[in-house]
Image (tube, rainbow, N blue to C red):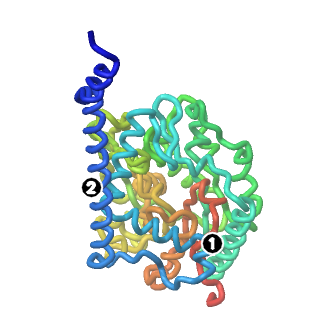
Amino acid sequence: MTSPSSRNSTQASAPPSTSATATFANSRLAGLCLVFFLAAGFLTVLYAVTVGGVSLTKPPVTWSAFLDGKTTKQIADSLADTPIPQAAAKLERGLSWLAIGDLGPRVRQGCARWLFLTDELTVYKHAEANALARAAELSQVKERLARQGIALLVVVVPDKSRISDQLLCGLRRPAAFEHRVDDWIKALSGVNVLSLADDMQDPQERYFLRTDTHWNEKGADVAARAIAQRLREPGDYVLPAPTLQMRTEVSAVVRRPGDLVRLAGIDWLPAGLQPPADMMRPTRFVEVGATQAAAKDPSAPAADTGDDLFGDTGVPSIAVLGTSFSRNASFIPFLETALGMRVGNFARDGGEFAGAAHAYFNSASFKDTPPKLVIWEIPERSLQRPLGSEPAIWPLDGGK
């Protein structure tokens, strides 16, 4: 008969169970992985700072900046740009999307896999003051252009979340945004403004891309026609006789990757694991020659058939400023077709409210060959954004 003491002795000397051994091994593996990533992160940061020229802070480093947390934020942002944190962030974004459908802080998903930019749903601090400041600055620029004999048409592109609100589903667009475009237009003093929202109200149409912030070709075409119609109305600018005739053709179906997928950080995933991309038939524009009106008027500017907008074949009298809306969905060719003439495109990707205007009004192109008309495209979502380090549209103290 086995005594209690012998049983205890037997239990004490028994080897560890298989599950305990596996747990211990997994813990050691997890620890080794953690040590590896910490070491790899440290080495990549060390290399980036000592060899790669990465600066952890932006001078000058002040005591007040340190107390406000700005210095530590700069260090964190700089460290995030090194390879290991970038790879980890990329992996996290992909796994979050696949596991729970999370698209990160900049993108939100409505119904039918429609994606929306968070900026369009965000109420900013001092929103009304920001919008009024931009209205005042634009009114001043209008006066300065008028002194040079240059007309101005401001075109406000409505939010995707305004026009496609039936696809927001669980997303909430603040009620305060309902009248913000109308209120901003009222604040402009004597400026010719066109809001495109009224031209995009057909419930049977889609004017924006599903996975992109921008309009589709339907939206771009509607916008171009609305602008041409406004310019034909009596006003500060008399639209010249058409000098260009265009023919359109429909191309084969192509896949259109959306910028919201890239912004969500999941564009690196296989196409089948991403939100369904837009499929579209891009329009081809073919110049078929000058119009009869241009042929009868030898003094009319010749159509520009080259790549250089300001080549020997003629200088466009219309300059388009704005954002990537003017650089997407063939907006400029649609506008040229609607107007019957070439235009100069000076829009800038990411230009927001003032980026393109600041660059153009201080450029040699404007100073040497000023236009007769400036069409200024502004997204609704840019009106109330924080002013921050936004450049002055045009240094008015040096105006003539």
Image coordinates for residue 239, horizontal then vertical, percent: 55, 63
Of residue 342 and residue 189, the one placed in the foreground of this image is 189
In the figure, 64 relative to 400: above or below?
above
Of residue 397 and residue 220, the one placed in the foreground of this image is 397
How far apart marks 2 and 1 lie (CA) works out to 33 Å
Q: Quadrant of the C terminus?
A: bottom right
Task: Left or right? Give the position of 332 relative to 353.
Answer: left
In the figure, 369 relative to 325: above or below?
below
Q: Which mark, residue 68?
A: 1
Residue ID at (28%, 75%): 52
**Can see residue 210?**
yes
Q: Quadrant of residue 134?
A: bottom right
Task: Left or right? Give the position of 131 relative to 62.
Answer: right
Is the Cβ of the residue at disc 2 closer than 8 Å to that at disc 1? Answer: no
Q: Which mark, residue 230?
A: none
Of residue 140 and residue 86, the one placed in the foreground of this image is 86
What kind of residue is marked 1? Asp
